[in-house]
Amino acid sequence: MHKSTKVITLITFILFSVASVSSIVFTAETKPIVFKLGHFEPPDVYTTIEHPMAVVFKSIVEARTNGQIKVEIYPSCTLGKEREMMESTQLGVIQGCIIAEGTVPIFFPLIQVFSIPYLFPTESIGWKVTDGSFGKELFEEMRRTTGLRVIATGRGAFRNFTNSKHPIHSPKDMKGLKLRTMQIPAHMAMVKALGGAATPISWAEIYSALQTGVVDGQENPVGIIVSGRLYEVQKYLTLDGHVYSTSFFMINDEWFKSLPKSYQKIILDAGRAATVTGRGVSRLQDALGLKKLKDEGMEVYSPTSEEMAEFRKRSQGTVIQWLRENVKGSDKWIDKLLKETEDTEKKLGW
């Protein structure tokens, strides 16, 4: 065979092999694809949100791929803190992570539109909006600009204020209180608008900060207050539900697109199951946790409709204005979110 003919034949073979990679048939002898999945919570399915999501995801993916994708779960920040896990996922060092919303704005500032206070009157409305056209469009923008594909949104619960000084019944009771927030500027703007002093502190340091008086209070869903044993250093809980809190399960988009189409479908379906798991476990933990907090001696207060209206009046417009001025490109996303929330409320008869 002529040398040039051999070269053409070789090139043709290589091109054919590359084009056929998505249709590879995996056999029992094929080395499994490893999916490294990190999160920050302990490996306990009864007191956490992220670990049950990870366990359900692993079970579905491994079963439906006949073990050809092996999901390795690394809990308790084994692979680094949340920012490090997001960076590792973005770079493809690991394949995925489940992250609380506090770290996401560093990579994708537009996610802060979900921080508009007192936006959703119920969890179900928040779930519907997140799963609807607005959520899909926002997460597509995140995938396009960061290379991180959101396949699940767990938790979907409301954040509430606690403190060690006095009951909070209305915004005037917030004055002078030093409150821990996540490192989300929109959350800090909300606390300031309500009269408090916001101090961003990492989750790992929150207990000691409350115990030593570095801050007077904090804000979190009921389930997190219980799992973090914050009732030991906090006396008062106000169920104002100021911000809809979400965990994001994200994966490296390039890795995802390298998989056969059949495996991509399995990954996405397992993500939907993880979403339902996270939300269900979170809602159950909130329900059970409220009794736990009362039994531990916390004073729990539910604001009246008039008091809730005052909380909303003092903070919502201020945070929306802050987002428009400080988060580039947020205008259209804010308007879309407000419109979809209004439409969803009407559809659900709220």
Image (cartoon, rainbow, N blue to C red):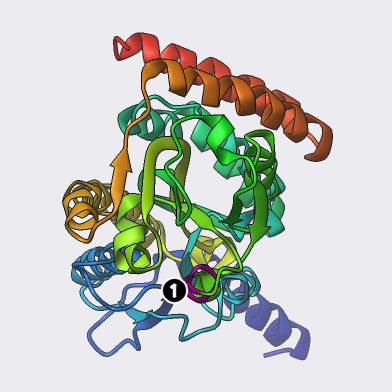
Measuring from the top left, give residue 229's x and y in whole percent. 33, 69
Residue positioned 32% across, 32% down in the render: 302
Q: Which kind of residue does numbered mark 1 sit on?
A: Phe
Magenta extent: 207-211
**Residue nearest the viewer, comparing 27 with 89:** 89
In the visual, does 11 lie left or right of 23?
right
Residue positioned 57% across, 25% down in the render: 337
| Residue 201 on the magenta span | no
In the visual, does 214 lie left or right of 51?
right
Q: Is residue 137 visible?
A: no
Residue at the disc numbered 1: 40
Report the magenta stretch's main SS: helix
In the visual, does 41 lie left or right of 329?
left
Measuring from the top left, give residue 24's x and y in whole percent. 39, 72
Secondary structure beneath label 1: loop
**Residue nearest the viewer, comparing 72 with 346:** 346
In the visual, does 19 lie left or right of 70?
right
**Residue nearest the viewer, comparing 172 with 120:** 172
Residue positioned 41% across, 34% down in the render: 240
